[in-house]
Image (cartoon, rainbow, N blue to C red):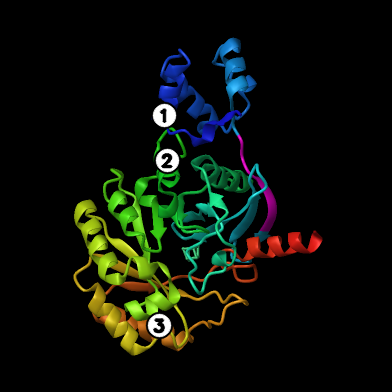
Amino acid sequence: MKKNLFGYTLSALEDEMVSLGEKRFRATQLFQWMYGKNVYDFDSMTDMSKSFRSLLGEQYECVLPSIHTEQVAKDGTIKLLLNMSDGAKVETVLMRYDYGNAICVSSEVGCSMGCAFCASGLLKKERNLTAAEMIGEVLVMNARLAEVGERVSHIVVMGTGEPFDNYDEVSKFIHIANEPKGLGIGARHITVSTCGIVPGIERYANEGIQVNLAISLHAPNTEIRSALMPINRHYPLETLLPAVKDYVEKSGRRVTFEYILIKGVNDREEDAKELCERLAGILCYVNLIPLNPVPEKPFERSEPTTTRRFAEYLNAHGVNCTVRKEWGTGIDAACGQLRAKAKKEENHGQ
Ligand code: SF4
């Protein structure tokens, strides 16, 4: 089987070139063609000898996903359902902010974390995505944006899947994305979001590049969190928050807590109070997210006044927070919805 070149970090590709009896700079040449010029056909890489190009063609390939479905919302949000080479379907979303174009990358095909409010968890994990496939998500979106003279400027690994359940491939992906000769996206423009896999957070603290960390918290106490997120039974808040503190100390980076507001579940004043007490002393920022309701799930979005009051309480009690801008109105906005829909259609067709 041919190896997909998008799965190599620059240093791994240099080692690969040396193993072929070539000079290390061949890797830089390949990166320049693939990421600098978007040329993926070895025959067109004219600064390399014909014999080397044919050797590359025998052993390697540059494979990108194809677009299965595309939805574009009025606010410019683009949601793609991508076909991987084995037929696996993966969602990737582009959100347009004042500061740039942020892509939300999926890290697994399906997810087994079972968060009660999440559409992605409706379809269990089938497999990990490779670094090459995650790079593919960005490159396909870049090709789509090139039509309007733009490109992806920020990456959040926050789509379907738990990134730290697929640590090695996600780590490789981050390094290729951050590599100036690769996608060239600054570390501070890359965020990985975990539902709270503590060993992953500990490893991430030692990753050596200044990427951001976000924690899907969604609850002020263990009781509510365990009801919403089964991972809390393995890594309860009492274990998770010290690991986050440790990450902040080691990295010097502020951490983001994601908190989806769910009507009557985690949006009361007592929840806001408890949340402030929990987060006291942690260098952090809370991103309050209005719930995207999923028809198969029993949860409702908090009222706008409740959301506003919750945010005001946090800000007044020393916890910086904002309410996340709504995006993707009019399309299947909740993460995982488009993929679930396509699966349903496939099953009907069988
Ligand atoms: S919220 Fe994230 S971790 Fe939880 S089930 Fe959905 S995709 Fe998985």
Residue farthest front in this picture: 234
Residue 327 on image: x %, y %: 54, 68
Mark 2 lies on a secondary structure that is helix
Residue 151's x, y, as percent?
A: 53, 46
From the viewer's side, name the closer residue of 1 and 90: 1
Instruction: Give me the residue at 52% from left, 60% from top.
Output: 111
Is residue 47 in the magenta section?
no
* 108 vs 4: above or below: below
Frontmost residue, 185 versus 203: 203
Q: Which quarter of the rendered picture does the C terminus lie within? A: bottom right
How far across and how far down the image is residue 267, in percent? Answer: 40, 84
Residue 172 is marked as: 2
In the picture, the disc for residue 102 is none
On residue 12, the disc is 1
Identified at 71% across, 64% down, the residue is: 344
| CA distance separating discs 1 and 3 | 45 Å
Q: How far apart are the two marked residues, 3 and 2, measured between alpha carbons?
A: 36 Å
Q: Earlier in the sequence, mark 2 or mark 1?
A: 1
* Left or right of 130 on screen, residue 171: left
Q: Is residue 89 above or below residue 46?
A: below
User: Looking at the image, which residue sits at the far right?
Assistant: 349
Residues drawn in magenta? 63-70
Contact, CB < 8 Å: mark 1 with mark 3?
no
Secondary structure mainly formed by the magenta segment:
strand
Q: Which amino acid does the dot numbered 3 rest on?
A: Asn
User: What amino acid does circle 2 point to?
Assistant: Lys
Residue 38 position (above or below residue 193):
above
Label 3, residues with CA under 10 Å away: few <14, some 14-19, many ≥20: many
> In the image, is the residue at mark 1 within 8 Å of ligand 1 by its beta carbon?
no
Q: What amino acid type should be assigned to the residue bearing mark 1? A: Ala
